[in-house]
Amino acid sequence: ASEKNNIEHESCVPEEDQEPQTPAEKLEHPQDRSLDSDGADCGGCPTEDSIPIMKDFLEQLFGVLHEEFAILKQEIAANVKDLKREATELGQKFDTVEHAHDAQKEEIDQHKKEILALQDSNRDL
């Protein structure tokens, strides 16, 4: 069983040269620990000896999940801040465009009035 385990966990980079990238990768799974003196996997149902190992693993897991949650919470807060800033900028751009559009519409209406006035004066001639 331990030979099969070694094959499954083999990678291109030796394990001691690999650096964990995330808190979850730092977590030591209880199956990676051995309770037997000959180094065989503990496996099977929990025993009196394996319960502390499982408890330690679950505490580590909770710690990792807490760290990951804190990281995600910070990233979400930063994204919300960016989105609010972008929304404010877009709102300001919209107001500027809307104001320019209204000004152009007023200018067009004024030109129409001038054209109608000129047409009326041409009819009189």
Image: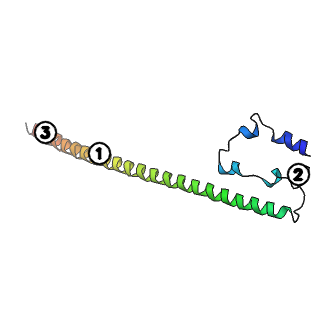
Residue to which mark 3 is pinned:
118
Mark 1, secondary structure of its residue: helix
Mark 2, secondary structure of its residue: loop
Q: Position of residue 43 (x, y in %)?
A: 89, 55
Identity, as a three-letter code, of the amino acid under mark 2: Asp
Distance in Å between CA atoms under marks 2 and 3: 99 Å
Identity, as a three-letter code, of the amino acid under mark 1: His
Residue to which mark 2 is pinned:
41
Horizontal side, residue 69 vs residue 8: left or right = left
Q: Position of residue 77 (x, y in %)?
A: 50, 55
Task: Identify the image quadrant of the C terminus.
Answer: top left
Q: Residue at x 11, y 37 (%)?
A: 122
What is the quadrant of residue 18 in the picture?
top right
Q: Position of residue 46 (x, y in %)?
A: 87, 62
Return the disc, 2 or 1, that comes first in the chain's sequence: 2
Horizontal side, residue 70 vs residue 93: left or right = right
Return the disc, 3 or 1, that comes first in the chain's sequence: 1
